[in-house]
Amino acid sequence: MSLPVGKLDAELLAGLLAQAPAPDERVILGPGIGRDVAVLDMGSRCLVAKTDPITFATDHIGYYAVHVNANDIATSGARPLWFLGTLLLPETEATADLARDIFGQIIQACTGMGVQLVGGHTEVTYGLDRPILVGQMLGEVSREDLVTPDGLRPGDSILLTKRLGIEAASIIAREKSEDLLRRGFPGEFIAAAQAMLFEPGISVLKEAQLACAVAKSSGGHVHAMHDPTEGGVATGLWELAQAAGVGLEVWGEKLPEDPRARRLADAYELDLWGVIASGALLIGVCPSLAEPIRQELEGQGIPCTEIARATVPEAGVLVVRDGRREELPRYDQDEIGKLFA
């Protein structure tokens, strides 16, 4: 039986990863559910590595690839420094102008973050119906500033930056613009939703760096960060709990939704909790640091909301809404995949 579009089922993936050879002693963080990056011991500093493809979007894929990979580097407290890209162009649509456009996006995005394009591979590929770009990002962080996903502890506060649905709204508006016009959405609304790719934007680098700086200046440390992508914020929360071996109590009424994303999700009957969610960052810290970090981010123009509390693992991963406590939903297949099935 064929697998559905999107991430592999978490249990299937865990079984596959379990077959990997035992890492050598220099592997600080290897593969696992809820782990955004690999971390390698380079002495006084750590090398942080990430790879992620761009599959749902077909527009601005160079920009997407640089930023989504940089986001995951940022979740470790590291600074993204070096980018590689594997670009596969469809044989029926490959042109020099298309290659120039995508490379221009990559270089512009790298330049904006102080990242260097250091390599990759480009080819025209048989059997594709759209360009595919797989990015790889490398970064560095000191051992003392490294943040790993297993650092979340019972009692920690979970903060969410920005709002649900930023990336999904931009993708829907870009990929379904003609259909949205037929459905009666105003052109101005569609254009505004498309622009959400850049403002408020899908990057979480700034808020990750600010959170770490506030914690360090207070004599503390960010315990964990996670970039919710496919499967949305709900799946991101579940992955965060899995990586740390803790439970969660999520306060459903506090999850902030972007109103444009809500309208677009409703139009296509998508659950906003399960749509691709770059642009939002989950931050786990001790309760005493939650308010200072939230205030600093808000002061820098980045919305930030406390949405959950880590609990003991026996309590499970629960959401409280409408006076009910129930298991937090998990979306192994992103809701936005329904638009491309």
Image: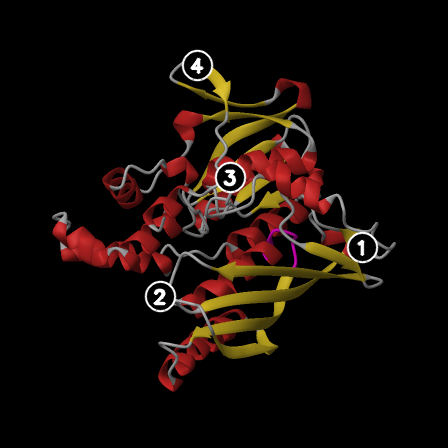
- Assess disc 3: are there few (<14), some (14-19) or many (≥20) residues with their C-alpha within 10 Å of its C-alpha: some
Q: Report the side of 208 relative to 48 (left or right).
A: left
- Disc 4/disc 2 C-alpha distance (Å): 41 Å
Q: Report the side of 175 relative to 305 (left or right).
A: left
Say the numbered circle drawn on residue 324: 4
Question: Which residue is the site of mark 1?
Answer: 27
- Disc 3/disc 2 C-alpha distance (Å): 24 Å
* Front residue (pair 20, 330): 20
Residue 95, picture quadrant: bottom left
Q: Amino acid at mark 2?
A: Asp
**Residue occupying image coordinates x 22% and y 57%:** 177
- Disc 1/disc 3 C-alpha distance (Å): 27 Å
* Front residue (pair 183, 287): 183
Give the residues drawn in magenta, as a range. Answer: 74-78
| Main secondary-structure element of the magenta-colored stretch | loop
Label 1 close to label 3 by CB (< 8 Å): no
**Residue occupying image coordinates x 61% and y 51%:** 75
Label 2 close to label 1 by CB (< 8 Å): no
User: Circle 3 sits in a helix, a strand or a loop, which is it?
Assistant: loop
User: Circle 4 sits in a helix, a strand or a loop, which is it?
Assistant: strand
Question: Which residue is the site of mark 3?
Answer: 332
Residue farthest top in this picture? 323
- Assess disc 2: are there few (<14), some (14-19) or many (≥20) residues with their C-alpha within 10 Å of its C-alpha: few
Q: Amino acid at mark 3?
A: Asp
In this rendering, the label closer to the viewer, 1 or 3: 3
Question: Which residue is the site of mark 2?
Answer: 59
**Residue occupying image coordinates x 43% and y 56%:** 202
Chain-order first, disc 3 or disc 2: 2
